[in-house]
Image (cartoon, rainbow, N blue to C red):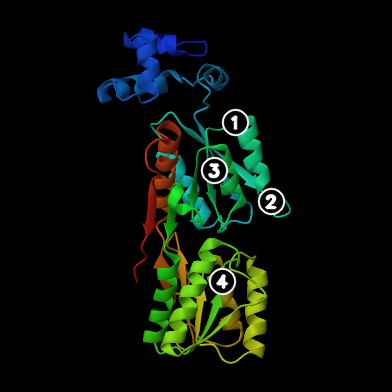
Amino acid sequence: MPPETKTTTRPTLKTIAQLSGLAIPTVSRALNDAPDIGEATKARVRAIANEVGYRPDRAALHLRTGKTNVIALVLSTHDDMMNHTARLITSIAVATRGTPYHMIVTPYFADQDPMDPVRYITETRCADGIILNQTLPRDPRVEHLMQIGFPFVTHGRTDWSDTHPFYDFDNATFGALTVQTLAERKRQSLLLVAPPRDQFYAMEMTRAIKDDVARRGLSLHILATATSDDVTSNIERAVAEHLATQPPVDGVICASPNSAMAVVTALEGSGRKIGTDVDVIAKEAVPFLKHVRQEMLVINEDVSKAGEFVCHALMQRIDKPDLPPMQFLEQPSP
């Protein structure tokens, strides 16, 4: 666009209408992805809006429509930022591109009630919908959002998953695959570094691992003094103590890449060689572990797909609440 067409004041819908030759209502509907506006027109309007630096006045939008065009991702500050959560944030942000929606990240802390950010968002209406993860079977956040009819989607399932949108990784299948892989490598005495026991995916994973271990006649210990969400120093110390006091371990199952790295450090510190004396198997969202130890066994979780899915599922829940909730269960493969 030639320099003379740019405005020196904050561009508005009227600015875009003048430059495009379209009516202001048409411009507004194009920017909001209205189905009765052609794709070519939408693309032209968005290109002009980007060129002039148009940003919607969210206060005015909220007064006019009751919407903010904001979706909120609520995250614990203890999430795995190196791998899982970083990829999730990126994929959600990419999925909002070209839509009227923008993402905000709302954190909560270990000493804080997880309901606090949910109540803040719903009471202030600073977002049109919420994305939650680290779900509990009967998650109070989900129960509250269902009761008040506020749009949400979960990355993970709950006891009410048949009624709300979700994306989840099949952690039961993951658990069974880890035991199968280790059994095929003739491992007999297994250690599980499990997620926090109250979370839905931890229950699914642990149940499947216990069932498959019993079926195969193997032995299993669950690390008692740390979870896969703990800081790596705590996991390393807990694993080292377990190795020193419990029967020999020749296979370790990890629910996160951070815990896998802590396990490797503890195992090698005790003189064990990965891939020879003991196998370590873990899931990860970003290829990383095999760059550190080629001998590690890895099952991939497609968090990029998860982020895209939960974003579109939430936008549908906001804009078309009468449609059936979007739901997807990702199947891991060896």
Tell me, yes or no, whether the two marked residues, 2 and 4, touch with CB atoms within 8 Å: no
Residue 132 point in image, percent of width and height: 54, 48
For the residues labelled 3 and 2, the Cα–Cα distance comes to: 24 Å
For the residues labelled 4 and 1, the Cα–Cα distance comes to: 35 Å
| Tag of residue 126 | 1
Q: Earlier in the sequence, mark 4 or mark 3?
A: 3
Residues packed near mark 1 inside 10 Å, few (<14), some (14 to 19) or many (20 plus) = some
| Tag of residue 109 | 2
For the residues labelled 3 and 1, the Cα–Cα distance comes to: 18 Å
Does residue 109 appear to the left or right of 82 in the view shown? right
User: Nearest the camera: 198 or 27?
Assistant: 198
Residue 320 point in image, percent of width and height: 40, 33
Which of discs 3 and 2 lies nearer the camera? The answer is 3
Which of discs 1 and 2 lies nearer the camera? The answer is 1
Kindly state the secondary structure of the residue where label 2 is placed. loop
User: Nearest the camera: 252 or 52?
Assistant: 252
Q: Amino acid at mark 2?
A: Phe
Kindly state the secondary structure of the residue where label 1 is placed. loop
| Tag of residue 194 | 4
Q: Earlier in the sequence, mark 3 or mark 2?
A: 2
Residue displayed at 40% across by 9% down: 4
| Tag of residue 146 | 3
Tell me, yes or no, whether the two marked residues, 4 and 1, touch with CB atoms within 8 Å: no
